Amino acid sequence: MISAVAAFAATAILPAKTAGTLSGEDRLFTPVRQTELRAQSFPLLVSDSYFSVWSPFDRLYDGPTSHWFETVRPLAGAVRVDGEVYRFMGASEDGFFGNAAEQLSVDVLPTQTYYTFRCGPVALDVVFTAPLLIDDLDLMSTPINYISYRARSLDKASHDVQFYVDTAPVLAVHEPGQDTETRSMSRGGLDYAYSGTIEQPYAVRSGDYTGIDWGYVYLAGRSGASASTVIGKSDEVRGSFEVTGKFPGMLPEVIVDRDTAYTAVLAYCHDLGQVDKAGKHGFFMAGYDDVYCMEYMYELYMAYWKHEGEVSIYDAFERFQRDYLQIMERCRDFDEKIMRDAEAAGGQKYAELLAFSYRPAIAAHKLFTDKKGNLLFFSKENGSNGSVNTVDLTYPSAPLFLLYNTDLLKGMMTSIFEYSESGRWAKPFPAHDIGKYPKANGQTYPEDMPVEEAGNMVILSATIAKAEGTPEYAARWWSLLSQWTDYLVEYGLDPENQLCTDDFAGHWAHNANLSVKAIMGVAAYSELARMQGMEDTADRYMAKAREMASAWIEKADDGDHYRLAFDRPDTWSLKYNIVWDKLWNTGVFPEDVMAKEIPYYLANQNRYGVPLDCREDYTKSDWIMWIAAMAPDRETFDMLVNPVYDYVNESPRRFPMGDWYGTVDCMPIQFRARSVIAGHWMPVLMMKSR
């Protein structure tokens, strides 16, 4: 006799009461927390910067789903109840499924988005799950998402119900007009529909605002009489479902589209049959096999989950099918952990911000191993310039990875170290980036950030050592870290007119916050030296850091606050780099520095947050969270964080989590779905370090 869990995994579709004897069907469709925050855009299918589908509407059926850069990436969904069709997802412009359901609720958790709809006499629950579990590299890197659904009668009668979702080849192209081939097949008890370009130009197209045009998008569901996954001409497949609740009898095995109007759809349908109050449920999967994910130093690499070609996309789908309940339970437990930690650090509103931040923060990366066996975790600058592994994106993103998996932070840094060691980068400070996504062959950004990136790399090396309790990783790169620290000692106290990460309003020489970064970089080197038993070196560099801090206080002082630039009175800026002094308890800067700064920030705060500096009214949400981590009490913390919550909740521009935005007009500026929002975890990191 097989167990109930095994039986569910085998069939994937069971009445609710039977499933309830497992771990509780309600656990699949009930979020661990209800959320009130209205997302700028709701995450649906989110694995990486290419396989990324969102809904920029309050109601899932109010318009088309789209990529993070706002190009349409269509998902359409409908339920047929007693012959009446209700559209719960996607646009109605083409006349498909014109009767909208009634959305009752939506809740966003770190790995899952929960919707509930009323479809006439039936309630429909739909859950989009991206198993981006940060402590499971195989699961996190596998580009497969679940779509789970449940139908329940709302009255005493039973109702005949069919569930339907489709998508299109456009998920696998950069722009309309690229020739595609769409196919269907069955293997290992699963039916597949998949589509990709005919050309398959692996990692040829690079840059920002680019869709993938190599690899294949997949829908996969359990083979069976009541559920099927097919391809077909869109009008035929949709029309048949509307009229009969089923797919047409004769469907093609391949469809070639050679013009801008893609006729093919990849479709999934499940005939739930008679549904009563207890309900019935099921799931299917959507995924993307990019075949090769990155070009690194002129060689193509497969993503981590493939294990150098030993694991196929079909193996992955079969595992996800087999382990559905286990993976869903792990996602639920992970959501609970993230929310619990966040609530402890900053309360419900802060926790909801983190729930909305998690998926885009992880999905802005690609994970693989190089030929030396190094784990590499490459970020992409979404909505800024498409750079790979930008050091000043790695720096603000560090808190999430310091908390839950330092190997991923090291995976962002190793390529920068190796690039410098290779001889291809000969400057006395780190590179800004390692290429333009997905080509990671060396820096492409036209301008260096000497103090910025040197300070970032040394500070991050120290944070890893402290998180792991060993300086082993930093010791591996000690010669470079020593060189970069000496650069900070020589040039960091009073930086010349050079680029830094916050120069949206232009470069200013003598930047006080950049100087803080240099000072904390020198202190970080001292901490690393001490962890390696180099007491004399540690004492010498810590003394230098304190000497630089004393000079900084004198040069930056402007009465009731500290200046943006040493030579510019009546200016100010966020001094978020001091957070490491608080986190490490090194005492490089006196306590009264931030005690004087934070009240000044609040005095200059606008409706949606504290500006980045005095020049413009825009800000960065990650840096506000770093300032909030240094707040003296919960009341001050809330005064800093709640305006960021209001910005996300009220922003009129609907793309995923823009970290750079106006504090007066509530409008995000350019950046979106970037890795830097992992920096929102700094208050949690501060709480756990105390």
Image: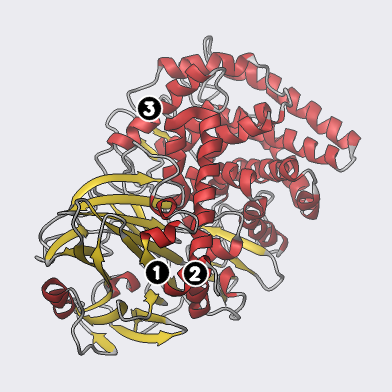
Rendered-image quadrant of the C terminus: top right
Q: Position of residue 656 (x, y in %)?
A: 35, 48
Q: CB of mark 3 within 8 Å of CB of mark 2?
A: no
Q: CA distance from mark 3 to mark 2?
A: 40 Å
Residue 503 seen from this side: no
Residue 538 seen from this side: yes
Residue under numbered circle 3: 643
- In the foreground, 331 or 449: 331
Q: Earlier in the sequence, mark 3 or mark 2?
A: 2
Rendered-image quadrant of the N terminus: bottom right
Foreground: disc 3 or disc 1: 1
Left-right relation of 354 to 260 = right
Number of residues whose C-alpha sits closer than 10 Å to that of mark 1, classed few (under 14), some (14–19) or many (20 or more): many
Residue under numbered circle 1: 285
Question: In this rendering, is residue 586 above or below 208?
Answer: above
Number of residues whose C-alpha sits closer than 10 Å to that of mark 3, classed few (under 14), some (14–19) or many (20 or more): many
Left-right relation of 220 to 573 = left
Residue at 66% across, 30% down:
583
Q: CA distance from mark 1 to mark 2?
A: 8 Å
- In the foreground, 582 or 339: 339
Q: Earlier in the sequence, mark 3 or mark 1?
A: 1
Q: CB of mark 1 within 8 Å of CB of mark 2?
A: yes
Q: Position of residue 536 (x, y in %)?
A: 90, 34
Residue at 61% across, 17% down:
593
Q: Earlier in the sequence, mark 1 or mark 2?
A: 1
Name the amino acid type tagged 2: Phe
Q: CA distance from mark 3 to mark 1?
A: 37 Å
Res 489 → quadrant: top right
